[in-house]
Amino acid sequence: MEAQKEALQRIISTLAHKNDEIQNFIETLNHTLKGVQANASSVIGELDEEFDGLYSILDEMKESMTTSIKQAEAHKTQELQNQLSQCSKSLENSEELLEFATRSLDIKDTEEFSKAARQIKDRVTMAPAFRLSLRPKVSDNMTHLMVDFSQERQMLQALKFLPVPRAPEIVLADCLVADNSVTISWQMPEEDNKIDHYVLEYRKTNFDGLPRVKDERCWESIDYIKGTEYTLSGLRFDSKYMNFRVRACNKAVAGDCSDPVTLETKALVFNLDGSSSHMNLKVEDSCVEWDSSGGKGQENKVKGKENKGSGQITLLKNNTSGTPSPKRSSVSLRSPLIRGSRDRFTGESYTVLGDTAIESGQHYWEVKAQKDCKSYSVGVTYKNLGKFDQLGKTNTSWCVHINNWLQTTFAAKHNNKAKVLDVVVPDRIGIYCDFDGGQLSFYNASSKQLLYTFKTKFSQPLLPGFMVWCGGLTVTTGLQVPTAVKTLQKNENGLSGSASSLTNVAQ
């Protein structure tokens, strides 16, 4: 009976998984159908624009050629009219001279006849008619302005759709996810010297495998990539995976997208648990500030968040300046037992904890203090930290403490013991936690200089912990363990940064 139930349960699980795949495929098909219609309309619109452009060019050429013909006609007409006018005047003068010569033949007086003959001779010598060219200055031929469109007609008749570039292939072995950056590499299935550029599209997701259509983020794109590799840097890994696809473009058209690939982008993401923070702390998303008013007006806001059972996380982008990103996203709490399951910190324990427990693996986050912050601590603790307890003063909490009240002091604290650190306090502190390896290290987040390492054995889940007095802290999560930190951790092997007096086996 039990064996049959287990077999049936496996069948049910398989069917449910298959149904989910089919449903996702149906949504993909529907999405593709809509895309076909939208893209067809878009292509027709572009085709109309291209032909309208051709018509416009032909109209401009026709107008220009017509103008040239009319100019040639006007020039020839003017030349011929000038020549015609000259000939008409010459003919008129010649006829008048001819009439005068004819009348002179009737003169009887010898002297008058001689005088008339001399006049006729002089006038004939100067007559325009004898200086005229009796050939037209221009011909009536206009064939030099004729156009042969046979070659262009053949070109237009041979017009066809441009060859669409083939889909690139993403080379998964050459893709790299490290330091909150993703490098994507691809190649063309065959050489294509007409490729002008590539378009890389990506989006965050919590689903492994093929991209889904429903309840997914929109694709973001990076255009005009000239090479076959691109690195997306400064990412915040607040999702488990990222989808990537690439398309090739020539001068006129973009090809199909490559088969999408999904890369794992896991990192620790947590928010500050305002429901249990000290009333003198004002907690908003991933920021905490000292509030001398004692939290009045904040209590109602916190209660409202408790009723919703979820919080808003300010996305902080991993960059060199550590400044927050303006983007925000709602994220469900990973460990609902943490929120609202403990008393508020009180007394002089100006503390707030993270809302996500660390139970295994290697994790990294960063903290930046306000310039005028008088005192603060950053580290980890078991969730049983008492409401009057301070970080580093119990045997279940570890931290570094910075005091700027009278003079700056920097110390590592655990079990109410302190180790003064002879290093400059950095602007941003990086916290590295290797739960399985039993290490908690603090770094200069900018230079990756190792500040201090606790070595112990963690026996319970850990919570990120923060104490602040007269000032504020900003926490950046969604960060991978930096490559430089991984290298330093491998090479540390008990260097002087780890004080044996603070090393213990955690209870």
Image (tube, rainbow, N blue to C red):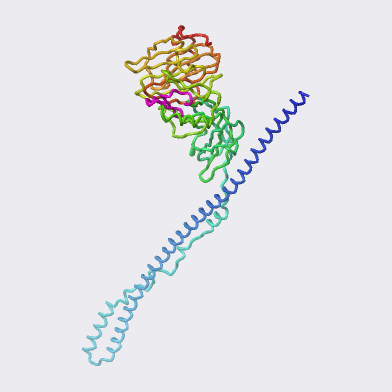
* Closer to us: 391 or 138: 391
Identity of the residue furthest to the left in this view: 111
Q: Which residues are magenta?
A: 274-294
Identity of the residue furthest to the top in this view: 501
Residue 452 vertical position relative to residue 272 in the rendered view, above or below: above
| Membership of 290 in magenta stretch | yes
Q: Position of residue 373 (x, y in %)?
A: 36, 22
Residue 475 vertical position relative to residue 187 in the rendered view, above or below: above
Residue 316 can be seen, yes or no: no
Residue 462 vertical position relative to residue 177 in the rendered view, above or below: above
Q: Quadrant of residue 348?
A: top left
Q: Position of residue 156 (x, y in %)?
A: 55, 55
Residue for point 55% across, 16% down:
460
Residue for point 46% across, 61% down:
62
Q: Position of residue 89 (x, y in %)?
A: 31, 78
Q: Quadrant of residue 16?
A: top right
Residue for point 48% across, 58% down:
58
Q: Position of residue 249 (x, y in %)?
A: 53, 41
Query: How many numbered callouts?
Result: 0
Residue 107 can be seen, yes or no: yes
Please identify the quadrant where the N terminus is shown.
top right
Identity of the residue furthest to the bottom in this view: 108
Residue for point 26% across, 81% down:
121
| Membership of 362 in magenta stretch | no
* Closer to us: 472 or 152: 472
Residue 356 vertical position relative to residue 72 in the rendered view, above or below: above
